[in-house]
Image (cartoon, rainbow, N blue to C red):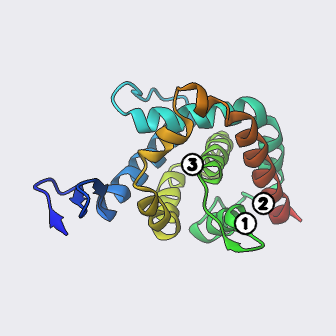
Amino acid sequence: MKKTMASTTWLTSNNTTQPTREFVFEQNTTFAINIVKEALGEKVDLSKDKIYRTLSTCVGEVLANCESPMQQLVNRLDLSRGIGHDKFATLADELFEAENGFIVLWERIVTLFAFTWVLSKQLHTDPVVSSSNVSKILASYLNDKITPWILQQGGWVQICNEFGDDEAASNKWKYFFLTGLGIGLVATYKLTH
């Protein structure tokens, strides 16, 4: 394998660039920070990053259809001591677990971001706990458990291919909502019972 001058990608034998693990870590952190900022009503410039814009649009679509049920389930979580890495990881693991093991899909990743959005908003309204660490916890979870899959897919850019603006991608929305909502609700239900 031949390294390029840029530290963010490497060149494969068929001359396609793949993101490095460190670059995906940086994106994970940026995307986690941005989703929490959006949840708290802060402005995030979507014009500069097509990948985050696609992710944010996907999260927005999930929230438009599922925010109320997600909010009801977040309300049932015991957040009296905030949300730590272990509690968040338990929730996220439930989201990615299936009969065949740990299954990562873009739909499940977006559902995790949507749930993080709802959770951040909830924590922000509670004077006892803070939402400030949620982005760090999400980024850490992505780095630990999801990054290998993202790298196998060719990086975060692949979410644009799956759920971009073209007609073929938009036809996936119907199935995306059903998958995302179902997984999110089941995972949260398991944690509250």
CA neighbours of label 1 inside 10 A, class few (<14), some (14 to 19), many (20+): some
Q: Name the residue tied to disc 2.
A: 187
Secondary structure type for disc 2: helix
Camera-side mark, 1 or 3? 1
Q: Name the residue tied to disc 3.
A: 131
CA neighbours of label 3 inside 10 A, class few (<14), some (14 to 19), many (20+): many
The amino acid beneath tag 2 is: Ala
Q: Looking at the image, which is closer to me, 12 or 126?
A: 12
Report x, y in % for residue 150.
46, 59
Going by the image, does 112 lie left or right of 11? Answer: right
Which residue is found at the position 60% from the left and 36% from the top?
58
The residue most toward the front is 14
Q: Earlier in the sequence, mark 2 or mark 3?
A: 3
Q: CA distance from mark 2 to mark 3?
A: 21 Å
Q: What is the total number of numbered labels drawn onto the structure image? A: 3
Up the image or down, 116 lies above or below 168; here it is below
Do residues under tags 2 and 1 come within 8 Å of each other at their CB atoms? yes
The amino acid beneath tag 1 is: Glu
The amino acid beneath tag 3 is: Ser
Going by the image, does 93 lie left or right of 15? Answer: right
Q: Which of the 4 image quarters holds residue 101?
A: bottom right
